[in-house]
Image: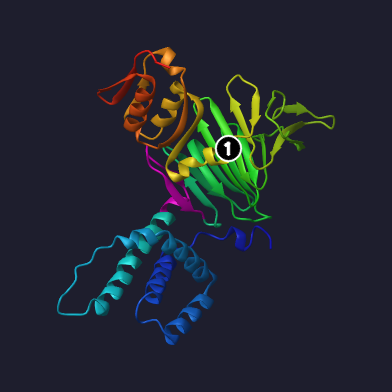
């Protein structure tokens, strides 16, 4: 199957998503029976978009399971609850599916963002799942030859759907991360970009340009932490044009680019790298100044460390993302520091007692 066929189909029309949502709600209601199931089979066979819509709506239904638990409906004393609760629950659930499916439709084809302290999961048209961390912006552009997502800022976890003939590329700064059936994290801060491979394989290269006319030379990343000062550079080719050098990562490896610094390779804890997906921040011998900056990603109220000596303290532990007050109080209690709320800042001051 070529990438110009079903792999590059247009997104599911909203009307089909609405129809699929109604089918799912009816299947979870009291009216389910042989006739309903036969009708669903006929509808699925009418058009390939129907099957795609049903698959997407089913995923949204499953994602909405937690929301359905909190639907509160009034009970009538004159009728058994069973007679009306399930139809209303199905209708309410259908509404949830429609709202979420509509949200996915509006979002995943263009720009997707999260605010400070917000996290979000979206399912792209190809089945790829993207988890966005706090204050993140991505731009999705699926073309016939390539599935392309650009990370403009923040951090995202990509669980890429396997499409061998339709490459998946994440553009971040002046680099691109090419994957196939892979899970990886890309993070872009001011002056620093990091790519961490969780599962599968990725190739990280500079963005191709008009002069990059020669196939890239692939460098297998070494198993241990290292500096890679010459990798990922464009170098002249003996055959003319420019050859792009790229680094192929193994699971668990992280490639970090910083302004005016060598490319670094290390193997951080995957649990720590992906802790934000569980709403956690794991610190491992992290200087307090850097730890405060990490906590500040999740909160409009900012931690400020006044004393340089305190800022150099090494912090270890697991903290709730966004709970800056608890973090500041825990650090202050451990090292004899003072915490003061000053406007939108939580100021940590004093000389540490060790």
Drawn side of residue 75 relative to residue 118, left or right: left
Residue 120 magenta: yes
Q: What colouring style does the render use?
A: rainbow
> At x 81% / y 30%, what residue is drawn?
237
Q: Write the residue at 39% across / 13% down.
A: 307
As drawn, 115 above or below 327: below
Left or right of residue 91: residue 321: right
Q: In which quarter of the image is the N terminus?
A: bottom right
Residue at 36% in and 82% down: 31
- Residue at 41% x, 53% y is 106
Q: Quadrant of residue 184?
A: top right
Q: Mark 1 points at which residue?
A: 269
x and y percentages locating residue 157 in the rendered image? 53, 44
Quadrant of residue 78 within the rendered picture: bottom left
Image location (x, y in percent) of residue 264: 64, 27
Question: At numbered mark 1, what does the secondary structure look like: helix, strand or loop?
Answer: loop
Considering every residue shown, the one lying at the far front of the view is 354
Q: Judge from the rendering whether residue 246 lies leftward or rightward of residue 31; answer left or right.
A: right
Q: Where is residue 34 in the image (x, y as percent from the top left)?
A: 45, 86
Q: Magenta stretch: give its range.
A: 106-124
Left or right position of 97 against 256 = left
């Amino acid at each position: 199957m070529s990438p110009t066929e079903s792999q590059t189909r247009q997104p599911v029309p909203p009307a089909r998503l609405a129809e699929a949502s109604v089918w799912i709600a009816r299947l979870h209601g009291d009216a389910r029976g042989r006739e309903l199931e036969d009708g669903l089979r006929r509808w699925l066979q009418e058009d390939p978009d129907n099957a795609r819509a049903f698959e997407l709506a089913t995923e949204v239904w499953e994602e909405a399971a937690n929301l359905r638990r909190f639907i509160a409906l009034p009970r009538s004393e004159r009728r058994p609850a069973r007679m009306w609760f399930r139809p209303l629950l199905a209708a309410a659930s259908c509404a949830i599916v429609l709202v979420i499916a509509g949200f996915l439709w509006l979002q995943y084809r263009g720009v997707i963002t999260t605010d400070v302290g917000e996290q979000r999961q979206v399912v792209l048209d190809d089945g790829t799942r993207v988890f966005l961390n706090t204050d993140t912006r991505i731009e999705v552009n699926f073309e016939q030859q390539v599935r392309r997502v650009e990370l403009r800022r923040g951090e995202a976890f990509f669980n890429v759907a396997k499409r061998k003939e339709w490459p998946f590329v994440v553009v971040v700064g002046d680099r691109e991360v090419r994957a196939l059936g892979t899970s990886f994290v890309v993070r872009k801060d001011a002056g620093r970009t990091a790519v961490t491979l969780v599962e599968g394989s990725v190739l990280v290269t500079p963005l191709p340009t008009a002069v990059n006319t020669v196939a890239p030379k692939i460098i297998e990343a070494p198993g241990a932490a290292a500096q890679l000062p010459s990798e990922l550079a464009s170098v002249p080719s003996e055959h003319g044009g420019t050859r792009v050098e790229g680094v192929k990562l193994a699971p668990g490896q992280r490639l970090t680019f910083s302004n005016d610094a060598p490319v670094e390779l290390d193997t951080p804890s995957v649990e720590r790298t992906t802790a934000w997906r569980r709403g956690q921040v794991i610190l491992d011998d992290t200087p307090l100044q850097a730890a405060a900056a990490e906590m500040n990603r999740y909160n409009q109220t900012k931690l400020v460390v006044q004393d340089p000596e305190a800022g150099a303290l090494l912090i270890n532990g697991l903290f709730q993302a966004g709970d800056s007050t608890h973090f500041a109080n825990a650090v202050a209690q451990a090292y004899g520091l003072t915490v003061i709320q000053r406007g939108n800042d939580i100021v940590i001051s004093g000389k540490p007692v060790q």
